[in-house]
Image (spheres, helix red, strand yellow):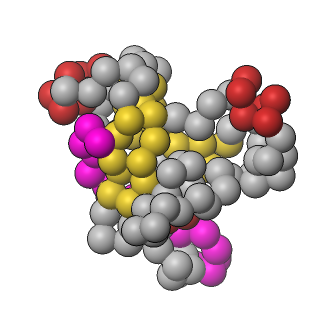
Amino acid sequence: TGFHDKARTHSTYGNVDVLKAACRQEMWINPLDAKARGIANGDRVRIFNSRGEVHIEAKVTPRILPGVVALGEGAWYNPDANRVDQAGCINVLTTQRPSPLAKGNPSHSNLVQVEKA
């Protein structure tokens, strides 16, 4: 899932270094899920599905439910040579299809896998 980040308004201010340092872009994961995957706080993780892949640091916290991971929305896309995002851009993992009723952003549920990078 995605959440509104403290350092940005969507992607606005995403290039301000002092804000990026104060509120780092991290993937939130529950301690139970992290333990099952051998992930410790600060470890670099691979988040992926059929749409794309993101490599970013993990924040292990009980503030998120088991079975759910989250990234702050609005991070700028920063791909490496293999088109793997290194900045935590959640859009890499979402569909481009609009929602059926409102024709808006459909990314309320994105199924992903997570492993230690």
Closest to the observer, 70 or 57: 57
Closest to the observer, 32 or 104: 32
- Location of residue 112 in the rendering, given as x and y in whole percent from the top left corner: 31, 55
Closest to the observer, 81 or 20: 81
Instruction: Describe residue 4's horizontal placement relative to residue 25 as left or right.
Output: right
- Location of residue 71 in the rendering, given as x and y in whole percent from the top left corner: 52, 43
Instruction: Describe residue 76's horizontal placement relative to residue 81 as left or right.
Output: right
Instruction: Describe residue 44's horizontal placement relative to residue 9 as left or right.
Output: left
Residue at 73% from the left image edge and 23% from the top image edge: 22
The answer to whether one can see residue 16 in this image is yes
Q: Is residue 111 magenta?
A: yes
- Location of residue 30 in the rendering, given as x and y in whole percent from the top left corner: 34, 25
Task: From this view, report whether residue 113 is shown above or below residue 65.
Answer: below
Task: From this view, report whether residue 10 is shown above or below residue 116.
Answer: below
* Magenta region, residue range: 101-117
**Quadrant housing residue 49:** bottom left
Residue at 39% from the left image edge and 20% from the top image edge: 41
Residue at 42% from the left image edge and 48% from the top image edge: 55
Task: From this view, report whether residue 112 is shown above or below residue 71.
Answer: below
Instruction: Describe residue 15's horizontal placement relative to residue 53 as left or right.
Output: right
Q: Is residue 96 magenta?
A: no
Image quadrant occupied by the C terminus: top left
The answer to whether one can see residue 70 in this image is no
Residue at 75% from the left image edge and 54% from the top image edge: 11
